[in-house]
Image: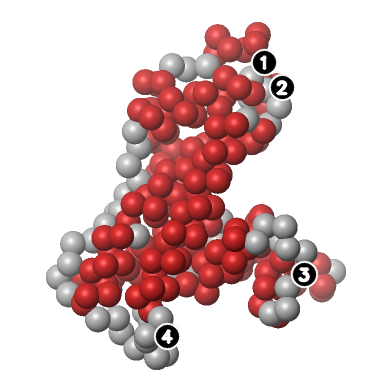
């Protein structure tokens, strides 16, 4: 069943901010992780950037944004019969439940048992799920002539400064001179954004198809 114009308008406007925050957070953490995974740069670090407070804060922002976005959508879908045209609502529900109950070790619902068994709370690319959701919201909005939201990721000096702080918190002191200033990182992060968005679009299911293929390969080996 298609969403009506009022519901699309509400979702389009209210979900845009938390989706953008999640995309920005994912961009920064992915950039930090990519630098750490680069063999040519690995020796610069005394610890994984993911161990820094700023990285953890961005990761938490991404998780909280998933909860906010799902609650916004659920509020508008609760009276609908059948499925809406919005994509990734099932996957976002799983993450919303997992984030809300981080210490829960057992689940009664099979879908959550499988979710935890496959470690999708850790392995899913949540930003990819939100990006695909946003594209489906924009498609629904276009049917009513409503302006789309979040057609790109806004890269700001604040994000570049945060990335620099993540690096500064995890790099060896003798390599601190190699750390670019925030202005240079702003340019690097803007360029990296193109690769990052391509990765999100390549894995609209959060990367689950790859995990399924890996499982199938192991079973057939």
Secondary structure beneath label 2: loop
User: Which residue is painted at 49% across and 58% down in the image?
Assistant: 66
Checking the image for residue 46, the label placed there is 2
User: Residue 83: which disc?
Assistant: 4
Give the CA separation, mark 2 to mark 4: 49 Å
Q: Position of residue 174 (x, y in %)?
A: 65, 8
| Label drawn at residue 106 | 3
Q: Residue 149's spot in the image, x, y percent?
A: 27, 57
Q: Cβ–Cβ below 8 Å for labels 4 and 1?
A: no
- Tag 3 near tag 1, CB within 8 Å: no
Q: Is residue 201 left or right of residue 221?
A: left
- Cα distance in 3D space between marks 1 and 2: 5 Å
Q: Position of residue 102 (x, y in %)?
A: 67, 57
- Which of marks 2 and 1 precedes in the sequence? 2
Residue 24 visible in the displayed image: yes
The residue at 35%/46% (across/down) is: 153
Crowd around label 2: few <14 · some 14–19 · many ≥20 (10 Å)? few
Residue contact at pointers 1 and 2, CB within 8 angstroms: yes
For label 4, count other residues whose C-alpha is less than 10 Å away and answer few (under 14), some (14-19) or many (20+): few
User: Alpha-carbon neighbours of circle 1 within 10 Å: few (<14), some, or many (≥20)?
Assistant: some
């Amino acid at each position: 069943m298609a969403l009506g114009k009022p519901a699309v308008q509400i979702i389009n406007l209210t979900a845009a901010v938390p989706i953008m925050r999640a995309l920005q957070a994912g961009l920064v953490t992915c950039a930090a992780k990519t630098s750490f995974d680069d063999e040519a740069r690995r020796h610069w670090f005394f610890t994984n950037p993911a161990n820094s407070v700023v990285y953890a804060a961005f990761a938490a922002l991404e998780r909280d944004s998933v909860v906010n976005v799902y609650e916004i959508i659920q509020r508008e879908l609760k009276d609908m019969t059948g499925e809406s045209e919005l994509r990734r609502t099932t996957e976002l529900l799983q993450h919303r439940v997992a984030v809300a109950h981080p210490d829960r070790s057992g689940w009664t619902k099979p879908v959550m048992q499988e979710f935890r068994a496959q470690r999708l709370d850790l392995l899913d690319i949540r930003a990819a799920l939100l990006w695909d959701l946003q594209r489906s919201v924009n498609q629904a909005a276009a049917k009513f002539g409503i302006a789309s939201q979040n057609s790109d990721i806004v890269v700001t000096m604040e994000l570049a400064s945060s990335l620099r702080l993540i690096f500064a918190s995890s790099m060896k002191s003798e390599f601190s001179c190699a750390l670019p200033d925030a202005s240079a990182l702003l340019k690097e992060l803007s360029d990296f954004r193109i690769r990052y968005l391509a990765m999100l679009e390549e894995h609209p299911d959060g990367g689950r198809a790859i995990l399924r293929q890996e499982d199938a390969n192991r079973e057939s080996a």
